[in-house]
Amino acid sequence: MEECKIKNLYNLEETIAKQLLESATYPWEALPKINEFIIKLGSELDKNIYEQKDENIWIAKTAKIMPTAYIAGPAIIGENAEIRHCAFIRGNAIIGNNAVVGNSTELKNVILFNGVQVPHYNYVGDSILGYKSHMGAGSITSNVKSDKKLVIVKNGEKTIETGLKKFGAMIGDNVEVGCGSILNPGSVIGKNTNIYPLSSVRGVIPENSIYKNQNEIVNKK
């Protein structure tokens, strides 16, 4: 499924995780490697830009971190990123330059490209969010199937077995996810796509489209 490949979802110049993603074909292949990648990369970061705050936690000196935020390592937080009141970063998190992690937002095992915004009551787990993607208030990634089986990516009759029990969403560059939406396990959203508020999304959503509901996905004009 070409539309699910990294090269068709993301501009890798907009993430410090470029090297990790270049080693994979599909983005979810990087999920089990985020921990090790952060620890290795953190020790190599420019000390003029980044400061090691705790074990395996590196934060850019220009980042704004509210004192009520909780950050567990391994984690890298980029330049001019903003981590707001009561944000909960549970580890294995790469947060890009100029990204916003907002009030009561929870992150776990994620890559947020530069300019990503998850600003209000979001849960993002085992997911990758592309350049300038945005999740509206209360929208979440659901990263475990209710039957606890391994996640399969589906696009019509085509399927890919991921071998992963935990897999939230692969969100392409410049995607807008409407408020209160749920991205079900194995969701892949093509770049420049809009998801209507209060949507329940599953499977592969084409790039440059508007998702109204499961039976109504239209091309942007």
Image (cartoon, rainbow, N blue to C red):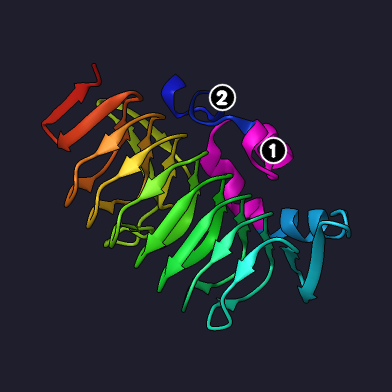
Residue placed furthest toward the left: 215
Residue shown at 38% from the left, 30% from the top? 190
Q: CA distance from mark 2 to mark 1?
A: 11 Å
Residue shown at 69% from the left, 67% from the top? 74
Q: Does residue 165 appear in the picture of this structure?
A: no
Please state the horizontal and vertical placement of residue 110, each as a whole percent of the image: 54, 55
Residue 192: quarter of image: top left
What is the magenta range? Answer: 13-34
Asked whether residue 17 is drawn in magenta, I would say yes
Image quadrant holding the N terminus, namely top left
Q: Secondary structure at mark 2?
A: helix
Residue placed furthest toward the bottom: 68
Which of the numbered marks, if any, corresponds to residue 36? Answer: none
Observer-nearest residue: 146 or 143?
143
- Relative to residue 69, is residue 206 drawn left or right? left
The residue carrying mark 2 is: 7
The residue carrying mark 1 is: 18
